[in-house]
Amino acid sequence: MGTWPDGPAVLEIVVPAHNEAGRLPAGLGLLCAKLAGFPVRSEVLVVDNASTDGTDDIVLSWDGGPVPVRLVRCARRGKGAAVRAGLLATRAPYAGFMDADMATDLAALDEAIVLLREGRPVVVGSRRHGRSVVQGYSLPVRRLGAITFNRIVRDLAGGIADTQCGFKFFDGPLARAAAADLRTEGFSFDVELLAHCVRRGASVTDIPVVWRDRPGSTFSVRRHSLQCLLDLARIRVRAGRAPAGRAPAGPALPPVQIVDVMPGPVAPTVKPG
Ligand SMILES: Nc1nc2c(ncn2[C@@H]2O[C@H](COP(=O)(O)OP(=O)(O)O)[C@@H](O)[C@H]2O)c(=O)[nH]1
Ligand SMILES: [Mg+2]
């Protein structure tokens, strides 16, 4: 369809991607098809996170029909670093991110955009919402880990029961401000990002999702759990030390190099970090 009035995108969706040549084509296909019929003009920003499998070439040659698909390069590894780079590259009134495997059914975008336009500053998918349908929600050990993880950080992240679902949408300026403050590069970044929004007075609205486990997860319980817990501890300690309403002390992640490749020629820019 793509019958929106002319003008800049109203919604920008960041897709972090590290070596996603296998899963990205199907994911981008679903996302562009959904956005082509969406009520607001939307764009996709794929953040290539130091991939070595040609993920960037897939994005560069992607024809999203009426939906522009841009490439942002992030040399710094980690989902947190990648999402941060992507959010800082957005300009739209609303911005969010989704995993490359599109494990969260895109139907949730319909509710998300309605709530954002009603003025909800943060809208996140929750697999623990009473009306969610979850198929194959990971191994029991990971599920238990996720529940424990959420218990530890619930108060920081606006009281929601699932901070880790890869489906989060924001008021655009809020997302950019929260991303600029982000320090966590790995998988625990969601908690810190939400905490930066809550600290600014934003409420967090969780919505039901249909979530299907997809093969090829890049998260490994063995390799990533310890780092996640250490990061959580750091987030909690920093939040405890910061005066009410103020950003925790210490440097945020360094500036990101943003390379806009689509659409049209846009000069590379360095955004403050
Ligand atoms: N593991 C990992 N994932 C990354 C990185 N950078 C971006 N990502 C993306 O983060 C998303 C994680 O989703 P997924 O692998 O499905 O993990 P899961 O759904 O949490 O099991 C994917 O889109 C990855 O490509 C990175 O450095 N490491
Ligand atoms: Mg996944």
Image (spheres, helix red, strand yellow):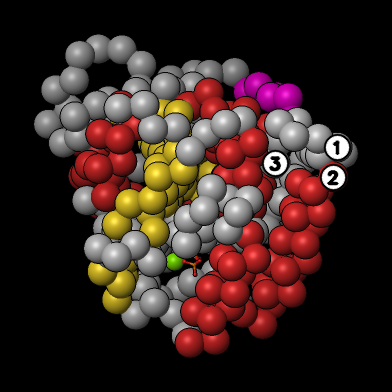
Mark 2 or mark 3, which is nearer the start of the sequence? 3
Q: x, y percentage for residue 36?
A: 20, 36
Q: Name above or below for residue 212 compared with residue 204.
A: below
Rendered image: mark on residue 241: 2
| Label 1 near ligand 1 (CB < 8 Å) | no
Is any atom of residue 101 visible in this view?
yes
Q: Name above or below for residue 147 compared with residue 236.
A: below
Is any atom of residue 26 visible in this view?
no
Magenta stretch?
268-273
- Name which residue type carries label 1: Ala
Residue visible at 57% across and 31% down? Answer: 201
Q: Quadrant of residue 264?
A: top left
- Identify the secondary structure beneath mark 2: helix
Rendered image: mark on residue 9: none
- Name which residue type carries label 3: Leu
- Name which residue type carries label 2: Arg
Q: Is residue 91 left or right of residue 244?
A: left
Q: Are marks 2 and 1 in contact (CB under 8 Å)?
A: yes
- Identify the secondary structure beneath mark 3: loop
Q: Name above or below for residue 110 compared with residue 188.
A: above
Mark 1 or mark 2, which is nearer the start of the sequence? 2
Q: How far is disc 3 from disc 2 in space, using C-alphas?
A: 16 Å
Q: Is residue 184 left or right of residue 36?
A: right
Name the front one of labels 3 and 2. 2
Q: Name above or below for residue 217 compared with residue 65.
A: below
Q: x, y percentage for residue 216?
A: 45, 74
Q: Residue beneath label 3, please? A: 182
Residue visible at 43% across and 23% down? Answer: 92
Q: Residue beneath label 1, please? A: 249
Residue visible at 46% across and 43% down? Answer: 204
**Residue placed farthest to the bottom in the image?**
140
Viewer-side residue, 273 vs 45: 273
